[in-house]
Structures are given as structure tokens and as C-alpha cells.
């Protein structure tokens, strides 16, 4: 692996509480030859002092400090500064496992048709307690199918080829609160995407992450983007579903991955119902039942979705009935 062939970008805004853990999780990677671009986005806490202290002892760290310009600006600034072949993301309150970078670089070097890769992750709380494991679909076709119902790439866990990110900047679409998912959807049209089936990242979730108002706005953007993706890629999604319900491959999935895959697959049924493609919805539901046990609660929810789909669109939208599901 060539020296400094990869760059890690980490914007920081008032991240002093968990910043030491995040920085050290990168500096202690088994893959050593990288540059770590840390952008202090106008923090008014001790973040800059912490970053500069590490910069004094590790020449791989590059510090940019200026007034606050927001996450999207900072991410694009980091991409422009990065000169390596690969760019990895890191959030200032999360933790990367020691072999994360090594395994992602090895994958991209061995699979030139892939331009973006993520990992499974573990959700942790403010005290580093592990809350939940997230088993995302690993294969390109499955990932692109699930974009119609959810963002299955943890932002801080990704690594991408520099050329892709240079051509497809954050914020170029119409979604400013889910800038990462918007970017994955645009990149998906140009390259294959994979997710490593290993827990190489820990994502921190705590009450200070988002206000209720911001979370609601993010959910609205997510609903709009997934619906647009469904409508614009419907033919491809129908084809990709064959990979999700491949009985031979499903035998190789671990229990956690099976649970995730089939729970989230109900999202395709809901999308089909709301699109009034009822026969297609039934066919997906029957394919789920072949792979997973019958769940009465899921069926009752789908019946509710069906009746909502019969309402005039304006009435359903007026009361946000579609977004309840």
C-alpha cells in the first residue's frame, strides 16, 4: 500500500466530549500510511486545543481551523484538500475499530469496479455502552434496492475513491439534512457499492445528536428521497429484489443479517402499496414469508397501509399519513 494513499476527513464542531476517543481510534489503525484532515468548523469549546495537541505529536494530522460554515461546506473542503486515491469519513464522536482502514483499502484495491464501501456498525450511547448491532446488506444489488426504503450506509464508516467524491459533492442535490444519503444515491448511478460484513465502526447515539424538530425534518427528507428513488429506479429495484430473496445465498447469512434484511424488506411492500402496485406488493410479501416466519403485527400494519393508499393523495399528505409508516 502506497504511502499517504488515503485521507481521513473529520469535521469537528464543539466535539470536545468524545474527540479524544475518535482521534485515537484513527491514529491507532493497523494501516498507518494516511493523512488525517481535521476541520475545526468554528468550535467555541476546547476542540481546537485537543486537535492541536495531537497535531504536535503526529505529523499525519492536518488541521484546518476557521469560522463556522457548516457540515456540508466542511466535507467538500476536506475532499478538495485530500490528494490520495481513497477518502474515508470519520465523525468526531464515533469510534473506528483498529483494522477498519486496512480492510476497506484492501477491498477497494482488489475490486476496482467498486467505488464506495461501508461497514456494519454498533450503536453506542454516551457512556460507550453497546446498544444495538446493525447488519446491513453486503452486496451491491441489495444495497441499491434498499435505498428505496432506507439509508443502509453509516456515513462515518464509508471509504470512497477520491475521483467519485470530487465529481459528486455533498449538497449538490436538494437534501441538506441527509446530505450523505443524497450523495450515495447519486454515486450509485456510477459505481458498485459494498458493505463489509464486519463490525468495524461504532456510531454514537445520544439525546444531543438531534433536536426533535431536526429529526422530523430529516425524516421528511428521507421519505421524499426514498420515494423519488423508488419511482426513478423501479425497474432496477424489481431486478435487485431477486438478490435479496435468493434462497441459496440466504443460507449463508448470519441470523443478525437475516433479521435485518427481512424486517426492512417490508418497506418494499409498503412502497408498492402506496404506489398502488398491489399485485407486486403481494408478490413481495409472499417472498418474505418464504424466507421469514409469519408476523401478525407486520400483516396488520400492511393492511393499515393498504387502506391509507386508497385515500386521495392530498388527504393522506395533509395528515402525513404515509409518513407514519
Image (cartoon, rainbow, N blue to C red):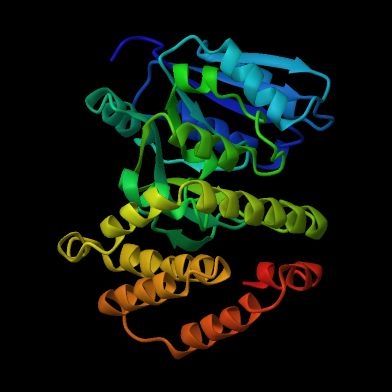
Q: Residue at coordinates 34% horizontally, 32% vertically from top-left?
A: 104
Q: Residue at coordinates 56% horizontally, 35% vertically from top-left?
A: 183
Residue lying farthest to the left in this orientation:
248
- Indicate left or right for 275 with 293 as reference: right
Snapshot quadrant of residue 220: bottom right
Q: Position of residue 15 (x, y in %)?
A: 71, 37
Task: Out of 59 and 277, give the one closest to the viewer.
Answer: 277
Task: Out of 307 and 108, give the one closest to the viewer.
Answer: 307
Q: Residue at coordinates 63% horizontally, 79% vertically from top-left?
A: 310
Snapshot quadrant of residue 23: top right
Reply above or below: 23 against 232: above
- Indicate left or right for 1 with 235 as reference: left
Q: Residue at coordinates 82% horizontally, 57% vertically from top-left?
A: 213
Q: Position of residue 47 (x, y in %)?
A: 73, 29
Snapshot quadrant of residue 307: bottom right
- Indicate left or right for 234 with 46 as reference: left
Reply above or below: 206 against 192: below
On the rendered image, what quadrant is the N terminus found in? top left
Reply above or below: 263 against 238: below
Q: Position of residue 246 (x, y in %)?
A: 22, 62
Q: Does residue 11 appear in this view? A: yes
Give the total number of marks visible in the rendering.
0
- Indicate left or right for 292 with 136 as reference: left
On the rendered image, what quadrant is the C terminus found in? bottom right
Q: Does residue 126 appear in this view? A: no
Q: Position of residue 73 (x, y in %)?
A: 71, 24
Amino acid at each position: 500500500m502506497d504511502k499517504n494513499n488515503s485521507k481521513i476527513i473529520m469535521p469537528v464542531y464543539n466535539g470536545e466530549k468524545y474527540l479524544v476517543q475518535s482521534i485515537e481510534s484513527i491514529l491507532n489503525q493497523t494501516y498507518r500510511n494516511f493523512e488525517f484532515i481535521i476541520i475545526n468548523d468554528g468550535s467555541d469549546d476546547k476542540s481546537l486545543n485537543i486537535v492541536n495537541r495531537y497535531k504536535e505529536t503526529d505529523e499525519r494530522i492536518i488541521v484546518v481551523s476557521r469560522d463556522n460554515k457548516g457540515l456540508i461546506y466542511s466535507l467538500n473542503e476536506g475532499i478538495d484538500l485530500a490528494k490520495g486515491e481513497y477518502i474515508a469519513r470519520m465523525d468526531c464522536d464515533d469510534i473506528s475499530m483498529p483494522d477498519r482502514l486496512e480492510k476497506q483499502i484492501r477491498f477497494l484495491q482488489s475490486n476496482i469496479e467498486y467505488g464506495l464501501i461501508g461497514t456494519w456498525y454498533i450503536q453506542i450511547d454516551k457512556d460507550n455502552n453497546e446498544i444495538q448491532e446493525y447488519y446491513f446488506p453486503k452486496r451491491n444489488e441489495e444495497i441499491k434496492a434498499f435505498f428505496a426504503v432506507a439509508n443502509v450506509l453509516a456515513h462515518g464508516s464509508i471509504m470512497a475513491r477520491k475521483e467519485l467524491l470530487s465529481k459528486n459533492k455533498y449538497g449538490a442535490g436538494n437534501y441538506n439534512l441527509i446530505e450523505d444519503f443524497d450523495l450515495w444515491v447519486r454515486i450509485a448511478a456510477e459505481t458498485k457499492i459494498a458493505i463489509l460484513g464486519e463490525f468495524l465502526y461504532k456510531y454514537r447515539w445520544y439525546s444531543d445528536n438531534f433536536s426533535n424538530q431536526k429529526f422530523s425534518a430529516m425524516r421528511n427528507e428521507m421519505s421524499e428521497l426514498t420515494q423519488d428513488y423508488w419511482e426513478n429506479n423501479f425497474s432496477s429495484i424489481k431486478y435487485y429484489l431477486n438478490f435479496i430473496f435468493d434462497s441459496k445465498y440466504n443460507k449463508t447469512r448470519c441470523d443478525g443479517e437475516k433479521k435485518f434484511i427481512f424486517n426492512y424488506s417490508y418497506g418494499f411492500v409498503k412502497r408498492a402499496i402506496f404506489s398502488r402496485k398491489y399485485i407486486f406488493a403481494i408478490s413481495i410479501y409472499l417472498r418474505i414469508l418464504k424466507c421469514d416466519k409469519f408476523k401478525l403485527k407486520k400483516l396488520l400494519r400492511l393492511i393499515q397501509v393498504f387502506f391509507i393508499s386508497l385515500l386521495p393523495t392530498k388527504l393522506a399528505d395533509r395528515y402525513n399519513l404515509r409518513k407514519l409508516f
